[in-house]
Amino acid sequence: MRRPIAGIATATLLILALALLLTLAPARAPGTSGMMAVVGCGAVLCTLMLTGVDDATIRFMTAAGYGSAQIIARHARGLASFFVVAMPGCWVVLGPVAAAIVTAVGVAVLFLLTLRILAYRLHPRRFADVLVSILAGILGLVAYALPVALPVIVPAMLWPLHRRGRARTWLLA
């Protein structure tokens, strides 16, 4: 699912499903806010499907000398191709609000993918999953209570994981 063709196929299916929902039953189609909820749910399901991560693969790539950026880029290829197709497609079919929803979902899922990869470079699977869950919860609380602080909190979460993971590159332990 990390291949670019998988992202293109998933985005095409999402756009076709949204277009069919609008054209087949226009009287029964949900209203504008309901349609945006459908776009959000569809984007979340599609992006999560494209971001599978195997902890053993991440640790092997780290031991083989791959840096964080290389691993993230390799795992985000399908996600990137999804957004190259899905954002303009949603803009054409449903307008700029739908494209903004797809963009927001994409940034959030890419952040979670990055957190998972950085955590798997350092810790065993269970501890890394707990760590990512805690960090995602903290991020959600900050986003709800003080969204202005997000540009400070996000690098504060990523930098320590990246710094410690950089020391593990080429370390066969």
Image: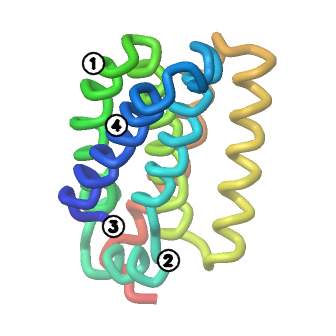
In the displayed structure image, the side of residue 65 where residue 101 appears, left or right: right
In the displayed structure image, the side of residue 116 where residue 139 appears, left or right: right
Q: Amino acid at mark 1?
A: Val
Q: Are marks 1 and 4 in contact (CB under 8 Å)?
A: no
Name the residue rendered at 31%, 35% in the picture.
86
Question: In front: mark 2 or mark 3?
Answer: 3
Residue 44 rendering spot, x and y as whole percentages: 54, 44
Q: Which badge, 2 or 3, is on the more N-terminal residue?
A: 3
Residue under numbered circle 4: 15
Residue under numbered circle 2: 55
Name the residue rendered at 25%, 74% in the picture.
65
Question: In front: mark 3 or mark 1?
Answer: 1
Residue 62 rendering spot, x and y as whole percentages: 35, 74
| Quadrant of the rendered image containing residue 138 | top right
Q: Report the Cα–Cα distance between label 2 and label 3.
A: 16 Å
Residue under numbered circle 3: 1
Q: Which badge, 4 or 2, is on the more N-terminal residue?
A: 4
Name the residue rendered at 27%, 45% in the picture.
12
Q: Report the Cα–Cα distance between label 4 and label 2.
A: 32 Å
Q: Report the Cα–Cα distance between label 1 and label 4.
A: 10 Å
Q: Report the Cα–Cα distance between label 3 and label 1.
A: 26 Å
Question: How dense is the environment of label 4, judged by Cα within 10 Å: few (below 14), some, or many (20 and up)?
Answer: many
Farthest residue, direction bottom: 173
Question: How dense is the environment of label 2, judged by Cα within 10 Å: few (below 14), some, or many (20 and up)?
Answer: some
